[in-house]
Amino acid sequence: MTTDNKTWILDHHPDGMPTLDTFRMETNDIPRAAEGEVLGKARWLSVDPYMRGRISAQANYAGGVAVGEAMHGAAVAEVIESHHPDWKPGDLFETIKFGWREYAAVPGDGLTRVDPSLGPEHAYLSYLGMPGLTALIALDLIGDVKPGETVLVSAASGAVGQVVGQIAKIRGARAVAVVSSQEKLDWCARLGFDAGINYRTQDDLAAAIKQACPKGVDVFFDNTAGPIHDAVMNNLALNARIIICGTISLAGQFEQPDMGERFLRKILVARARMEGFLIFDHLDKFDAAREQLAAWEKAGKLTFKTAIMDGIDTMPQAFLNLLTSQNFGKQVVRV
């Protein structure tokens, strides 16, 4: 086994959109697993929108990455060495505590065992992992979707959005996609979305949403914030539920104030409810949700697109592709 461990480090906090030189590669010795830990070798690494907040100097809902520290992130990894009774060499696990590196020593408690019978390994970073769990749990807890309602999803072809739309259809609702290209619109149509909007081709996005949602938006699953959010807020149905899941449209201005319209009057008139959602507030629901997602996939009710890049050297580019909508589906890196 090699003794080198390639690791991506945060070089500096970005001002605006991150660039490739926001990160630097370091090669260190492979760590040893202490008592209670396992040494894992990465097989799949994840990049996710929440990472933009983690590399900012601004306060966030979770601790950020310090300059000079290894990037945080989830991985599917193979146990190489174990000092924990539940794990042996060759076992596969998923954890958010791995980081952008080839090898990591992590506590054996709290790791998610990868069950190949439920889906492919990288599915634990997509529809069986944080994106799929977010879609199902948020849609059920906050969205409370009812048959016949209209569910609008921003970034609808992304890791979370494509699952949200399909679950909305399973629940008997009408699903409307907002995406950034015709190719992504076509994919959402294949998934069963009833209507779709390419926001980049619209002069009046609010009017386009009104046309696609003539009775208003009952459930808005917001993965982007920004102008899409503003346009949807002008099209709320009575008793609408608004799920705030992501703010990727702010990736290039994260350190600036979030500007936009004021919607308190519209929320009042619609008697709407707006709530932020963080998946790790709901750990107790993970197992049941994962089993449900796997069952839907096996029954042909859930389809998922994954964007795969190869090699740990591609991690920064994979992340930038995600932030600039150049990827398609869930972005992962095969190590």
Image: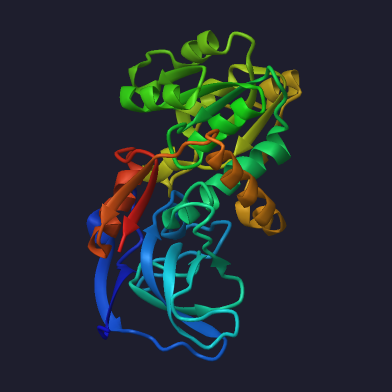
89 is higher (above) or lower (below) than 140: below
Q: In the rendered view, how is the structure colored?
A: rainbow
Quadrant location, the C terminus: bottom left
Q: Residue furthest bottom?
A: 35
Front residue of 17/190: it is 190
Total label count?
0
Percent of width and height locating residue 60: 54, 56
Percent of width and height locating residue 135: 58, 41
At 42% from the left and 69% from the top, the residue drawn is 77
29 is higher (above) or lower (below) than 212: below
Quadrant location, the N terminus: bottom left
Q: Is residue 17 visible?
A: no
Front residue of 84/236: it is 84
Left or right, 123 with respect to 233, comes to: left
326 is higher (above) or lower (below) than 117: above
At 47% from the left and 31% from the top, the residue drawn is 156
Percent of width and height locating residue 291: 63, 50
Percent of width and height locating residue 39: 44, 81
Front residue of 316/171: it is 171
The answer to which image quadrant residue 261 occupies is: top right
Q: Is residue 110 visible?
A: yes
At 55% from the left and 31% from the top, the residue drawn is 166
Front residue of 296/146: it is 296
At 37% from the left and 61% from the top, the residue drawn is 44
